[in-house]
Image (tube, rainbow, N blue to C red):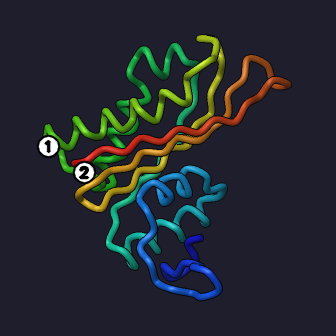
Amino acid sequence: MLLEGGYTLKGPNLEKVKPSLERSAILLALSETREEEEKLKKSLVESFGLRCGVTELGGTVANLQHTGKLTNTVMATAFNTGVIPKEDRKIHALIHATLEASNSIFIHTNSNASFALKIGLVTDYEWLAVAIYGRSSLHPLLEHARVGLGVMHL
């Protein structure tokens, strides 16, 4: 568990251990408030030198997946936050990690389903993790939580 100041609980002790990129991206996507998100980003950057980005978006499967809105939003976030530079190999890795994460989000759903998604991006300059967490529904009484994760080598 990542704690303030970059410390993690490891067994009965409190140690400064670099968290996995996957876990960090998922925690960013799961953060519930801007304050919680900012604390986590600050800890990951200052304690471990990781680069992070977070974004949110919503829509239906048809306008998120088929129009490229999800991928374009993730790319814009990655560029604007400095997670990756505008280099073809890094963009390629980002797109594949995003597609991998979105496979778990969009599976077994109706194209009219509405989504509210939060996306966490984390890199250590060698690997990149993209985590997507959100809720989907065709009707407010039929809401489902969904999570997806993609990891690629840069």
Which residue is at the front of the view, 123 or 18?
A: 18
Where, quadrant-wise, is the N terminus in this rendering? bottom right
Q: Is residue 66 above or below residue 128?
A: above
**Residue drawn at (48%, 45%), measured in percent from left and top?**
131
- Mark 1: amino acid: Glu
* Residue at image location 32% in from the left, 57% down from the top: 123
- For disc 2, the marked residue is 84
In this view of the protein, which residue sits in the foreground, 140 or 22?
Answer: 22
Camera-nearest residue between 72 and 127: 127
Q: Identity of the amino acid at label 2?
A: Ile
Residue 4, numbered circle: none
Q: Residue 33: horizontal and vertical position, in percent?
A: 64, 58
Are there few (<14), some (14-19), or many (20+) residues within 10 Å of tag 2?
A: many
Please state the horizontal and vertical placement of residue 108, each as a whole percent of the image: 62, 17
The quarter of the displayed image where residue 39 is located: bottom right
Numbered circles on residues, count: 2
